[in-house]
Image (cartoon, helix red, strand yellow):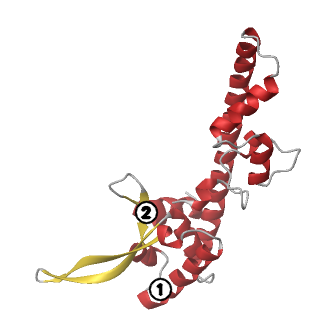
Amino acid sequence: MSQLELYQEKTFEEIKRINDYDQEYWSARELARVLEYTDWRNFLHVIQKAFEACKNANNQAFDHFVGVNELIETGKGAQREIQDFHLSRYACYLIVMNGDPRKEVIALGQTYFAIKTRQQELSEDQKRLSTREEMTKHNKSLAEAAQAAGVKNFGVFQNSGYKGLYGGLDQKQIHEKKGLKKSQKILDQYGQHRACGKPLSCHAS
């Protein structure tokens, strides 16, 4: 097994948690240990830099860095409260990218997340392609049905369909709202954020 595979199986995916809503998250305390930070205050500094990077990318940082208090056992049945964060995968990515590059585990993490991010981008592209293919088939069937029903101007008919899907916006208005060029197709941009052109999943947990 390569170091990268070992990193994936033993130092990141293994500590992933699932909440009551079936959403994945990571404990900052556990991630700190994995990334070989022995001083929580030093790791807090990395979290803060990652948090600022999240905000600067126009994301809702508090959705990715959720502050919580955890109870831990201190011996003889006693407990005490400690600070922690529930982190999204995106938050973990930002933390690793802002970590100490001299640590081997950080370097491996940066490679791991670069690969995972690329895989996700490919997945989003595949989703858009699949959706466009389905919509092409649907539009063909719709055109045949419209022709059989005696519709004379299918372009106007199709534009009415866009209005129904996009809150009354016609094809031209949708292009303007999404910031698309004339040569770009609306369906090619399915699932992308209009401001940055990135998949919508990049702006979520």
Q: Can you tell which quarter of the image residue 100 is in?
A: bottom right
For the question of whether residue 29 can be seen, the reply is yes
Q: Residues within 10 Å of mark 1 (few under 14, many from 20)?
A: some
> For the residue labelled by badge 2, is the local secondary structure a helix, a strand or a loop?
strand
Callout 2 crowding tier (Cα within 10 Å): few <14, some 14–19, many ≥20: many
Which x, y percent locates residue 131?
66, 35
User: Camera-side residue: 95 or 63?
Assistant: 63
Residue, disc 2: 25
Q: Earlier in the sequence, mark 1 or mark 2?
A: 2
Taking depth in this image into account, of 69 and 117 the one nearest to the observer is 69
Instruction: Please give left or right for residue 66 compared with residue 97 in the image.
Output: left
Q: Is residue 97 visible?
A: no
Question: In the rendered view of the protein, which quadrant contains the N terminus?
Answer: bottom right
Give the residue at the far left of this rendering: 76
Residue bearing mark 1: 44
Measure how far apart labels 1 and 2 are at the Cα level: 18 Å
Q: Is residue 197 left or right of residue 182?
A: left
